[in-house]
Image: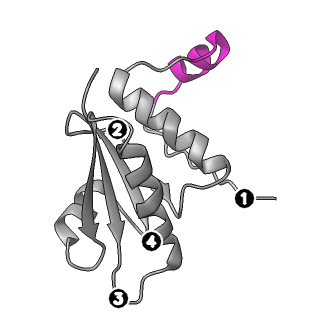
Amino acid sequence: DTPVTLLLFTQAIGGSESGRIAKQVLEEIASLSDKITIVEKSFVLDVEDRAKYGVEREPAIVPLSNDEDTRIRFYGAPTGYEFVSLIEAIVIAGTRKVELEDETKALLAGVQQPLHLQVFSTPT
């Protein structure tokens, strides 16, 4: 398995409550495996890293696979439905395996240019 680093961009002063919640969730997850590391980044001060990873707001979680960008981003606290997606992203980053249906693979094979895909989840 590949080491996974979770970059957590938060704002200590004036930041949202969801940043503290995101940190707690990540700490719980990281305590389960020595392959998972959390690296905290300041949304205000770490401007170069924000630009490097295209982080637009805080809190943001950027999973890295063996220090390589997975191009997956989570904004807000990963609770509820987002928690399951975060765990799946960590597994993908750690194993470098993505399980997709054949229909999805065929659809992706037809993509000819870069695609920016966003998924929004709202608790109900």
Q: Nearer the viewer, mark 1 or mark 4?
A: 4
The CA span between labels 3 and 1 is 26 Å
Q: Which residue is drawn at 67% across and 14% down?
A: 103
Q: Nearer the viewer, mark 4 or mark 2?
A: 4
What residue does disc 3 label? 13
What x and y, as percent, mark residue 24? 44, 61
Q: What residue type is labelled 3?
A: Ile
User: Which of the labelled discs sits on residue 122, or is there none?
Assistant: 1
What residue does disc 4 label? 20
Q: In this view, does 21 lie above or below 67?
A: below
User: Which of the labelled discs sits on residue 70, or is there none?
Assistant: 2
- The span shown in magenta is 100-112
Q: Secondary structure under badge 3?
A: loop
Q: Residue at x 60, y 49 (%)?
A: 82
What x and y, as percent, mark residue 109? 51, 17
- Tell me, yes or no, whether the highlighted magenta stretch contains residue 10: no
Q: In this view, does 19 lie to the left or right of 10?
A: right
Q: What residue type is labelled 4?
A: Arg
Q: What residue type is labelled 1?
A: Thr
Q: Which of marks 2 and 3 is nearer the N terminus?
A: 3
- The answer to whether marks 3 and 1 mark residues whose Cβ atoms lie closer than 8 Å is no
Q: In this view, does 8 lie above or below 45?
A: above
Q: Which of marks 1 and 2 is in front?
A: 1
Q: Secondary structure under badge 2?
A: loop
- In the picture, which quadrant includes the C terminus? bottom right
- Tell me, yes or no, whether the highlighted magenta stretch contains residue 105: yes
Q: Secondary structure under badge 1?
A: loop
